Image (tube, helix red, strand yellow):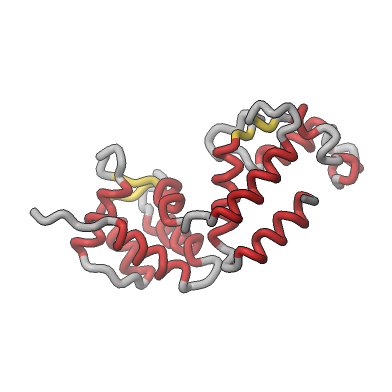
Amino acid sequence: PQLLDLTYPVEKLRLQCLMRGSSGIKGLGRTFRVMDDNQNRSLDLKEFLKGLNDYGLLMEKEEAAALFQHFDRDGSGTISFDEFLIALRPPMSRARLEVVMQAFRKMDKTGDGVITVEDLRGVYNAKYHPKYQNGELSEDQVFRTFLDSFDSPYDKDGKVTKEEFIDYYSGVSASIDSDVYFILMMRNAWKL
């Protein structure tokens, strides 16, 4: 059998998602959640093909099957939503990645490659957080809530690795067309 170039179907699918605007990839995720009949956060080939069709993505069945196999890294016959959506994100430019790393280094006070509650002291002021002000959360709880937004969704351990931080901003980056705007947003958000 002839081998298909998988980069082309991935690019084709990514482009069709991004043409739908900043919510294109997220919209595809919502469509796939609807297709996930048994709610197991994964799709078999039949659900995958139906999801592509329902989303209006134009792709030959052979291309879609090859794409499915590409995403099914463990050969289980299913793909997880998260692996699929992460694989669809366009890669960050060098300039975007550098500004993300500047933000990471600013937060990683100990320089050990992991952001923890200790790193946040003196970098993030919890005293202005509304739930701290009303007594609902302690300073450490505010820090932990902040870290959880960057932490891996299935392993909230209060430690944010460089990879988790980059992964978070890869998702943000996918919805922002302009490098200039993304960099400005990062500089303003992190006071870089």
Residue 159 against residue 7 in the figure, above or below: above
Return the residue nearer the eye: 190 or 33. 190
Q: Position of residue 4 (x, y in %)?
A: 19, 57
Query: At 77% from the left edge and 57% from the top edge, which residue is drawn?
Result: 188
Residue 55 against residue 164 in the figure, above or below: below
Return the residue nearer the eye: 169 or 57. 169
In screen coordinates, is 144 left or right of 28?
right
Q: Quadrant of residue 102?
A: top right
Residue 117 against residue 184 in the figure, above or below: above
In screen coordinates, is 87 left or right of 129?
left
Q: Quadrant of residue 172?
A: bottom right
Q: Position of residue 68 (x, y in %)?
A: 28, 53
Q: Position of residue 159 (x, y in %)?
A: 64, 30
Query: At 54% from the left edge and 66% from the top edge, which residue is drawn?
Result: 23
Direction left: furthest residue: 1
Query: At 30% from the left edge and 72% from the top edge, which residue is drawn?
Result: 58
